[in-house]
Image (cartoon, rainbow, N blue to C red):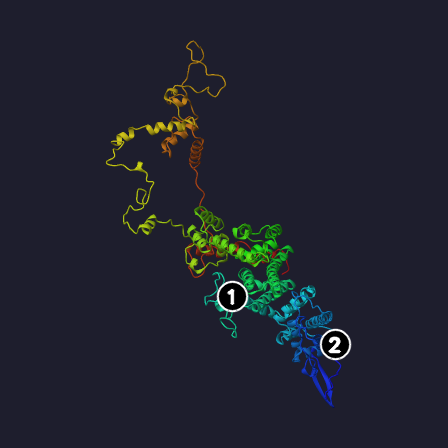
Amino acid sequence: MSDKKVNFVNPDCLPVEHVTLTVDNAGVVRQIPALDPYWVEDRLLIVYEKPPLDSVMVFGAVDTWRASMTLYLDNLKWLLSLEHHRFWSVVIYHPKCMDALVSFLQESNPPYMPPYENTEVQTLYGDIRKYIFIVFSRLITNKESKTEWMTKEHMSALIYNKFVFTIPILWDLCLEYGVDNKQHMSRLMASVFTLQPQYETDAKTALAFVTEAFKYIILQVNKDYDSDEPPNLPETFNGFSEIHRPGNSKHNDKLTFNILQDLIIHLLDTAMTLRLFLEVYPKSVKVFRETNFVNSIVQMYEYGIPMLYTKLKEVGDRRSTGYPAAERHIAMARGELVDMFREVLAHYKNAIFSGQDNVSLYVEQYLSAMMDALSERLFMRDYNACYPVHEDIEMLRQAYPEIDTVKTDFILQAIYSNLYDEYSTNQDAMTNGHYGSSSDSDSDSDSDSELESEVENTDNKIPDHLKQESLITEVRDILPHLGDGFILKCLEHYGFDSAKVINRIFEDNLDLCLKDIDPSLPIIPEDPLDKQFLETGVARLNVFDGDEFDVMVRDDVDLSRIHDGKKKSKYADLKDVLADKSEVRNMGDFYSKYSLVCDDSMYSDEYDDSYDAMATPAPVSDNTDMRRPFVTPRALRGRQDGDYEESSEESSEEEEEAQQPSSSSRNRMDFCVNPEEVRARREAAWQARRGKGHRPPPTPKSTDVTGKPKGQGQEKEVLNNRDRKEKHKSSRANHNRRSGAQWKRSQGMMPS
């Protein structure tokens, strides 16, 4: 028999996966790795069992359970007492070790269930729960001492490849310990996902499975078991064709109360587990976003929760003890779904308020999650009742002023329109299709039928012309590039729900029948002839059908525009047209407002307005006045010789200007000469005088020696410049140094 009581020796402090221990077995010395099946003891490890229920209590059942679970507790204590390498060897290589640990997570009492009434049972259960948590905490500890430790790389491969931790195990740990050990669970989850990032990929696969499970629950509660027709679900819900019933179930099995209880418990357990997973490990929001799990939450809340209440009334018995528990569990599942969405948004808000990098990215992700949730009105109404959205958006606006106001206004408008909708006013907050809680089943069924009929009438009501235009305007204000005809088609398809239409267009998630329509389609008015043909069955084929004078389709024809016979023209010829000044006289009233028109009797060409701007009136003309005689203004009389004299320079300029043709003829009756023209003429004269007898400077010679690039040929002038430079280069710069040195030596300036 081998001696397994060998002390662990690691003087070099090597990781445990590189340590080899020496074992002396009957004189035979062996080298055995520290992690090896050799160190596994032959010990019976039993699995955990649920305690007996009080309702089906059998004599001696509690004592039997206590004895069995005491042995289970001793096994846990023994496992924790092992050395580091023996502990890991048992966990990895013992065939029943992980089954024993996981059995407790599968059979434990979840938080939504009441504690056990028996004090002894509850005490023993609490001890087992404590040691299970310690075992899993030790499984993520890679270093216990200087000599007993394991590299993180080896540990990450070990826990992943040996299935020590899996996503179901992690989720069960969250459900069992996430309520009262949130801080320690956060460190545990962060360590696992940091050690092995591959768990994020597994989490995506697990969320995809949960999505299918939600769809299966919706299918079960919406299916009509008396017919082979598919469930009457909206077109927005996809994926039902991929769901298959279990192989051992019959197609005609009806939904019973026990099956309904299982569906409710499964929904509650899954919702609470995912909510706690988000709470203890907020970074998992990234996985939820990548799998678009928010849509699954909203759809489950919209199409699953109300039907669970309905099916509970159909197959349940109010007098049974299980009915109140099932009703309470549905309410808890509703709260967990709402809180799950709250945790998703809380991750984005915490990142924004903490001032992390890429704040704009978190703001966009927050708004995107809100837009996804707006696809169904029931969920958003209940969420807003629990957590007012306008308060969160107001805080976001203060923390990030550059937030997209179009999206925030659209979100608030959609929520408010949902709150004050006729459908929502008939129910209290957080009703979810569960109308009333009265004990009288008849009154409940009557109120349910009345509300259902009211909702049906509201949904099927076709809006009038004015309301239709207002809905089109509401959509066009946010999406101005769309045509009115395309918006009307979308409104008709989605039951005249403008918020739903805007959300679908933003998400690019329109149905196939709408994607083929031109987005710029205008509204095409209805042809009255088509309506007449449908009413009478008579098709009229005429080029004037439907015009403004068609008495067959119009009752308000303008008879003043209809003339019988030849109509006499007002004017006989063009001369009469030109002679008619009635239009000119009519314009006098219009221009009189601007004081631009006056009567002929008030206008006089001889009126002197020289003194109109002065305060004193103009002097009255009198022949006895001995002042200077009246002189005609110079601007109004012709030019005469001797009126004025100019200098010789100005006269010469005028002569030159007279000889040259002027670019623009100047009116001699102008009051004064344009100064610009005077300056231009003087400049031209000065330039002309300056050019007399003046020789322009010679054109500088080109000294270009560079020329064109090599291979393209050179001009003759460049070649001449090169020869000239080569010939005269000794006369300047640093050339002719030999003759200069000889002259210096001759003068004794430098030794020879």
**Labels in figure, total:** 2
Question: Could you tell me residue 10's position as x and y percent?
Answer: 74, 79
Element under disc 1: helix
Point out which mark residue 631 bears: none
Question: Could you tell me residue 696's position as x and y percent?
Answer: 44, 41
Spatial CA distance of label 2 from label 1 is 50 Å
Say which amino acid is labelled 2. Answer: Ser
Residue carrying label 2: 81
Question: Could you tell me residue 570's position as x and y percent?
Answer: 27, 31
Question: Could you tell me residue 400's position as x and y percent?
Answer: 60, 52
Which of the two marks, 2 or 1, is nearer to us in this view?
1
Say which amino acid is labelled 1. Answer: Leu
User: 735 or 535: nearer the eye?
Assistant: 535
Residue 278 seen in render:
yes
Quarter of the picture holding the N terminus: bottom right
Point out which mark residue 219 bears: 1
Residue 145 found in image quarter: bottom right
- Mark 2 or 1 closer to N-term? 2
Residue located farthest toward the top when viewing the structure as drawn: 624
